[in-house]
Image: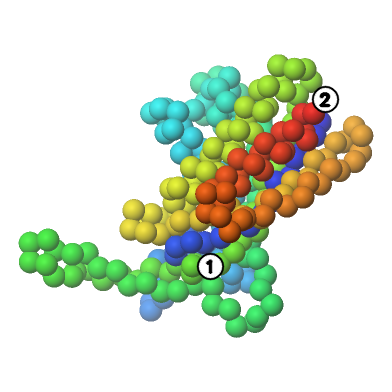
Amino acid sequence: MKKVIISGVIEVITGLHIGSNEAEVRIGGLENGVIKDKQGKPYIPGSSLKGKMRCLLEIDAGKRDIVRDYTEPIGKLFGTGANNEDKDIKRSHLIVRDANIKENKSDNIEYTELKTENVINRKNGTAEHPRTIERVVKGTEFSFEFIFNSYYIDDKGKEEEIELLELLRDGMKLLEYDYLGGNGTRGYGQIKFRDMKHNIIDFKQKNTQEADNVQNTSNEDKGKQDINIFFKDLTNKLYRS
């Protein structure tokens, strides 16, 4: 068995709102706050990343319902829960960690901002129902980590896993061109994956292979190819003969 640890940076391009699940809001408190850890710092739950990529891939594949079939690539990559038809939980090839704030040397960094919005009455053009939403500010960076479990034992399994890694690549690219969190159609939640690298841990050989970082380039067209280049390099190293 091999584990591929894919890590890097998620950069917030536009204000990001992933809401907290606090059961009650204190009087005078913020109703639409972002999710934070015990230290008061915002983070991106792994479930939000994994769920949004899965949803976008299902839509891209023309699926009208959640894919619960483990014979399909999406089911193999993300796993199937206990609600699938045969009531049998299937393991996921992909583990998605929570993405935590990339620490900054400054102690005075404000990671969030408050944005006030209104509903516009289209009949008379007046603003109604003002509300304040907390957002993670543009430019904030989170450290992400995906773990891909490689189980292949023959050439057929190898080809299937290459397909799964390409599926993960497509999910990341789709997410860059969509949005994460809430209020995306109003400009929130644009993100970019940067500075990716991978470690390949082979438990049989008890060694680790670390690839060089794939750096962004100043050329915009080349910069858009970063994820493709990264995964091509990864598959070449993981499945080379």
> Is disc 2 placed on a helix, strand or loop?
loop
Figure quadrant of residue 234 = top right
Quarter holding the N terminus is top right
> Is disc 1 placed on a helix, strand or loop?
loop
Residue shown at the point (44%, 33%) measured from the top left: 60
> In the depicted view, which residue is nearer to us: 34 or 111?
111
- Distance CA(mark 2)–CA(mark 1): 41 Å
Residue 179 place in picture, x, y as percent = 44, 51
Residue hosting label 1:
139
Residue 101 place in picture, x, y as percent = 62, 65
Residue hosting label 2:
241
Q: Is residue 36 left or right of residue 4?
A: left
Figure quadrant of residue 73 = top right
Give the mark nearest the N terminus, 2 or 1.
1
Which amino acid does the dot numbered 1 rest on?
Gly
Which amino acid does the dot numbered 2 rest on?
Ser
Report the residue that reaches farthest toward the bottom: 108
Label 2 CA crowd tier, 10 Å (few <14, some 14–19, many 20+):
few
Residue shown at the point (7%, 62%) measured from the top left: 123
Quarter holding the C terminus is top right
Tag in front: 2 or 1: 2
Is there any visible trace of residue 10 in the rendered image?
Answer: no
Up-down relation of residue 81 to residue 86 (above or below): below
